[in-house]
């Protein structure tokens, strides 16, 4: 499976500011996703990062709040904009490639965000 | 979109016993069903998965079964060990594996 480097691993941010999270993969992957996981909760899909085009957002998530870039098949960023304490959560990228015989969708190590 | 329901939310078993976690999904087009284990403070790790053209898959002490007609799938862990204690999540893919929707999670506690 792919090796994912996600950073930063954690950050404490002031409300009203923005934070950009990076996800770097060691090989080209077809699919990249961004999830949010609040403490003790399940994983909620924010969006699918599409290479060379706008991300596909899930209901309840909008581009102005969570802009996503994916300039190539190994890299993506998620920005959390105009942060409020409600944005405090763990953000994870996930990658996979359904065209490979034994693929498995793996997760980055996560970014623990605290907004104060 | 897909709706995945997972039961039970917590499960406590004695070491050596079996554990079963069940999930149902709503979208009949879903065709890939992975299971993840998440230990405290760590990322979810894929432990087993099954595609819609297979009814059962086994990997050592772990097995997954799928009933497409009833739209449910289950994780079976035999001979549980304390290191199996974690939160387990099921997931279902949308068409063409383009996204995953997760169940609410099951906290498994294996008592030594």
Image (cartoon, grey):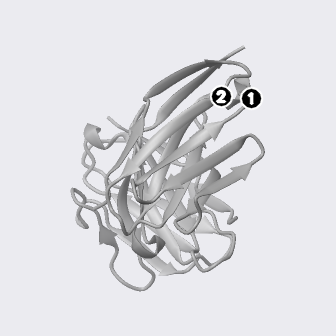
Circle 2 is placed at which residue position?
B18
Looking at the image, which residue is at 57% across and 69% down? A96
Nearest the viewer among B93 and A52 is B93
Nearest the viewer among B60 and B91 is B60
**Disc marking residue B79:** 1
Question: How many C-alpha atoms fall within 10 Å of the one at disc 2: few (<14), some, or many (≥20)?
Answer: some
Residue B3 coordinates in the image, percent (x, y) = 31, 53
- Distance between the alpha carbons at the discs numbered 1 and 2: 6 Å
| Position of A88 relative to A77 (above/below) | above
Which image quarter holds the C terminus of chain B?
A: top right
Nearest the viewer among B109 and A45 is B109
Image marks 1 and 2: residues in contact by CB distance under 8 Å = yes
| Position of A112 relative to A24 (above/below) | above
**Horizontally, is A90 left or right of B43 in the view?**
left
Residue A7 coordinates in the image, percent (x, y) = 55, 55
Q: Earlier in the sequence, mark 1 or mark 2?
A: 2
| Position of A90 relative to B52 (above/below) | above
């Amino acid at each position: 499976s792919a090796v994912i480097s996600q950073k930063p691993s954690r950050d404490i941010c002031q409300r009203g500011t923005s934070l950009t999270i990076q996800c770097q993969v060691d090989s080209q992957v077809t699919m990249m996703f961004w999830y949010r996981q609040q403490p003790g909760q399940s994983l909620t899909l924010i969006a699918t990062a599409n290479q060379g085009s706008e991300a596909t957002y899930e209901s309840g998530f909008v581009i102005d709040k969570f802009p996503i870039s994916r300039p190539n098949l190994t890299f993506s960023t998620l920005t959390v904009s105009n942060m409020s304490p409600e944005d405090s959560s763990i953000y994870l990228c996930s990658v996979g490639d359904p065209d490979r015989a034994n693929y498995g969708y793996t997760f980055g190590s996560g970014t623990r965000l605290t907004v104060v | 979109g897909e709706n995945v329901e997972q039961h039970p939310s917590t499960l406590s078993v004695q070491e050596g016993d079996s554990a079963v976690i069940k999930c149902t999904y709503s979208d009949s087009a879903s065709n890939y069903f992975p299971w993840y284990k998440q230990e405290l403070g760590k990322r979810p790790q894929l432990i087993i998965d099954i595609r819609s053209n297979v009814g059962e898959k086994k990997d050592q002490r772990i097995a997954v079964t799928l009933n497409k007609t009833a739209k449910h799938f289950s994780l079976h862990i035999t001979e549980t060990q304390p290191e199996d204690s974690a939160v387990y999540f099921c997931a279902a893919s949308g068409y063409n594996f383009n996204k995953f929707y997760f169940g609410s999670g099951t906290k498994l506690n294996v008592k030594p």
